[in-house]
């Protein structure tokens, strides 16, 4: 078994929709990033790569490379998952927290979990998602940023 952790933050600006967990959440703010700015998927990528000691998202998908500009993070996550699987690891489960003042993610939660499960090729029961506001303080509370954390547990293929 191996455990990994990932964290990511992206600045927000007026616009929309908000790209999160591989879906477009209707919102009046959008994420700024070299890729599509999906903080949640980037945290998942880092958790998977971290668990397999394969580095991090910035190492695998450098923002100095034009191919990564505006890139779909779902594609990046699938590639990271493949790299981890190539070493014999399978995902036991992932659990994530999104830090976002607005909108409430409750109504989008199942769709985001299902989307992440589909990208990873695992059952939705293996994908946990929690959501926290910034309690109106700090950069999250001021709606200047969205952040996400993820832990991933990997097992060798025979044990999963
Ligand atoms: Zn990111």
Image: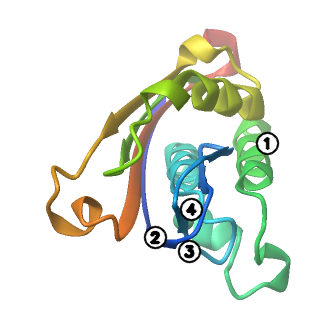
- Callout 1: CB less than 8 Å from ligand 1: no
Q: How is the image coloured?
A: rainbow
The CA span between labels 2 and 3 is 6 Å
**Residue at numbered disc 1:** 82
Secondary structure of residue under mark 2: strand
* Residue sitting at x 60%, y 43%: 21
The CA span between labels 3 and 4 is 23 Å
Which of 91 and 141 lies nearest the eye of the viewer? 141
The CA span between labels 2 and 4 is 26 Å
- Of the two numbered discs 3 and 4 on the same chain, state the one appearing first in sequence: 3
Labels 3 & 4 near each other (Cβ < 8 A): no
**Residue at numbered disc 3:** 32
Labels 1 & 4 near each other (Cβ < 8 A): no
- Of the two numbered discs 1 and 2 on the same chain, state the one appearing first in sequence: 2
Q: Answer few, some or many: residues within 10 Å of disc 2's Cα (few below 14, many 20 plus, some between 14 and 19).
A: many
Secondary structure of residue under mark 1: helix
**Residue at numbered disc 4:** 55
**Side of 71 relative to 38 (left or right):** right
Single out the mark in the foreground, 1 or 2.
2
Which of 9 and 52 lies nearest the eye of the viewer? 9
- Of the two numbered discs 1 and 3 on the same chain, state the one appearing first in sequence: 3
Dot label at residue 103: none
Is residue 71 visible from the viewing direction of this image? yes
Which image quarter is the C terminus in?
top right
The CA span between labels 1 and 2 is 30 Å
Q: Against 151, is 15 above or below? A: below
Q: Answer few, some or many: residues within 10 Å of disc 1's Cα (few below 14, many 20 plus, some between 14 and 19).
A: some
Q: Provide residue 120's location: percent of width, then percent of height.
A: 72, 32
Is residue 93 visible from the viewing direction of this image? no
**Residue at numbered disc 2:** 12
Secondary structure of residue under mark 3: loop
Please tell me in which quadrant of the rendered image residue 17 appears: bottom right
């Amino acid at each position: 078994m191996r455990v990994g952790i990932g964290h990511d933050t992206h600045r927000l600006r007026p616009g929309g929709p908000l790209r999160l967990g591989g879906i477009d959440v209707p919102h009046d703010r959008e994420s700024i990033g070299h890729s599509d700015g999906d903080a949640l998927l980037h945290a998942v990528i880092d958790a998977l790569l971290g668990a397999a000691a394969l580095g991090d998202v910035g190492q695998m998908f450098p923002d100095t490379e034009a191919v990564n500009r505006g890139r779909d993070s779902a594609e990046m996550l699938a590639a990271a998952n493949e790299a981890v699987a190539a070493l014999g690891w399978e995902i036991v489960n992932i659990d994530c927290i999104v830090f976002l003042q607005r909108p409430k993610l409750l109504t989008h939660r199942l769709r985001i979990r299902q989307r992440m499960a589909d990208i990873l090729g695992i059952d939705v029961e293996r994908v946990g998602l929690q959501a926290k506001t910034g309690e109106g303080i700090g950069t999250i509370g001021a709606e200047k940023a969205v952040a996400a954390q993820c832990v991933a547990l990997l097992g060798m293929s025979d044990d999963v």
